[in-house]
Image (cartoon, rainbow, N blue to C red):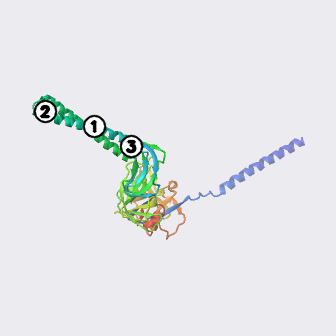
């Protein structure tokens, strides 16, 4: 009996202890302060705007080629028995480059000569007979019909002689075609056939670059074709002499892209090129022109597409706001802005997709004296800007 009573007392004490502990927890929870939410401040990179006339500046590598390059081939087929030039050989007009085996051509010429002599004999015989019958007709010994037949025979013999003469002359020319001669003064740039090879008529065997005007061949990307087509200020410099600038002219621009490089082949003529510029040299072509309207240049990463509008984030008093802009075009990896923002504003260039209107931001590397890439480029020369990566749109 005493054990049961003691057990009940202990249970009551345990219940009171649990109740007191729970009440204390509730009191402590009610007295604690609420946790303050940390303010969301986004780190961003910015650029400070500067406006100016844009120098459309683009530079492309190319190689020096001759204005005219001929692919020469024999006018008759045959076996090559002699090659008298190598790549790089300077040749003169009329110089023999290659020679075919002339034996078959000489035999054909002899055959044509024999046919000509036979036709000549028949003509002479027909002419003599016609004269005799003319005399007999004058004495009225033969009829007019017989004389007409002799005159017709003479005309046929004369025609046969003319045909044989033309065939002989043609075959004589064919025999002369066994020698391949250069038709211009220039330099051999390629040899496409060797001694012992049998070639067909018209197959190119030697390439000769004509001496004189040279040109630079480059490839232009499709996004710059329309812009560079209208530029007249074209400058050329070679890798061997980078400080020597030669004026050039866009002579030809292919309407079709190259299937391998997907670029449009352009030919820049340099008619007043010095003798130091050799064929095959590496050259660089620079296009330069100024726009009439002052524009602002921004990196492509600064654009924020909101539905159908194109905007940028402007930083004011530590917060950002969305500003719609009018894009005037592209300039290399940058865009040209014609309206919506003004020089002196600070525009976010990195982290634009994580921002919202009114959000506070922290500018990474904030320096009050920092200038945008646009302003820095204003102090660069065109050559320095071109060497920095063939950029288009260096502001001045």
Marks 1/3: CA–CA distance: 20 Å
Badge 3 marks a residue whose secondary structure is: helix
Q: Would you say residue 16 is visible in this rendering?
A: yes
Q: Position of residue 33 (x, y in %)?
A: 63, 58
Front residue (pair 373, 284)? 284
Q: Would you say residue 324 is visible in this rendering?
A: no
Which labelled disc corresponds to residue 218?
Answer: none
Pointer 3 residue: 106
- The nearer-to-camera label among 1 and 3 is 1
Q: Position of residue 133 (x, y in %)?
A: 15, 33
Marks 2/3: CA–CA distance: 46 Å
Which residue is pictured at 46% across the width and 50% down the height? 82
Marks 2/1: CA–CA distance: 26 Å
Which residue is pictured at 76% across the width and 48% down the height? 18
Badge 2 marks a residue whose secondary structure is: helix
Front residue (pair 70, 173)? 173
Which image quarter holds the N terminus? Answer: top right
Do the residues under discs 1 and 3 have CB atoms within 8 angstroms?
no
């Amino acid at each position: 009996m005493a054990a049961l009573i003691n057990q009940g007392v202990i249970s009551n004490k345990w219940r009171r202890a649990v109740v007191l502990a729970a009440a204390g927890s509730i009191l402590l929870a009610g007295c604690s302060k609420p946790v303050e939410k940390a303010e969301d401040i986004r780190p961003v990179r910015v650029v400070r705007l500067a406006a100016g006339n844009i120098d459309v500046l683009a530079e492309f590598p190319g190689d020096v080629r001759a204005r005219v390059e001929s692919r020469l081939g024999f006018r008759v087929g045959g076996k090559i028995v002699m090659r008298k030039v190598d790549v790089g050989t300077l040749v003169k007009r009329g110089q023999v480059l290659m020679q075919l085996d002339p034996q078959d051509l000489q035999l054909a010429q002899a055959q044509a000569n024999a046919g000509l002599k036979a036709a000549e004999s028949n003509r002479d015989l027909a002419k003599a007979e016609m004269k005799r019958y003319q005399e007999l007709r004058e004495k009225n010994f033969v009829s007019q019909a017989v004389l007409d037949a002799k005159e017709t025979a003479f005309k046929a013999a004369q025609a046969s002689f003319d045909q044989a003469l033309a065939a002989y002359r043609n075959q004589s020319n064919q025999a002369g075609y066994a020698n391949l001669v250069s038709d211009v003064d220039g330099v051999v740039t390629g040899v496409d056939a060797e001694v012992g090879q049998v070639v067909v008529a018209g197959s190119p065997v030697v390439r000769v670059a004509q001496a004189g005007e040279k040109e630079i061949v480059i490839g232009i990307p499709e996004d710059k074709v329309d812009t560079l087509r209208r530029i007249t200020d074209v400058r050329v410099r070679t890798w061997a002499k980078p400080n020597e600038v030669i004026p050039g002219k866009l002579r030809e621009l292919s309407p079709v892209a190259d299937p391998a490089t997907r670029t449009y082949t352009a030919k820049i003529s340099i008619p007043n090129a010095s003798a130091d510029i050799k064929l095959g040299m590496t050259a660089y072509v620079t296009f330069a022109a100024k726009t009439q309207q002052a524009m602002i240049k921004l990196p492509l990463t600064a654009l924020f597409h909101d539905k159908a509008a194109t905007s940028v984030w402007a930083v004011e008093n530590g917060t950002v706001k969305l500003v719609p802009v009018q894009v005037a075009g592209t300039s290399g990896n940058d865009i040209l802005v014609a309206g919506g923002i003004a020089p002196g504003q600070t525009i976010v260039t990195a982290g634009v997709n994580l921002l919202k209107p009114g959000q506070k931001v922290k500018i990474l590397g904030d320096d009050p004296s920092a200038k945008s890439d646009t302003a820095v480029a204003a102090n660069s020369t065109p050559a320095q800007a071109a060497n920095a990566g063939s950029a288009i749109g260096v502001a001045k």
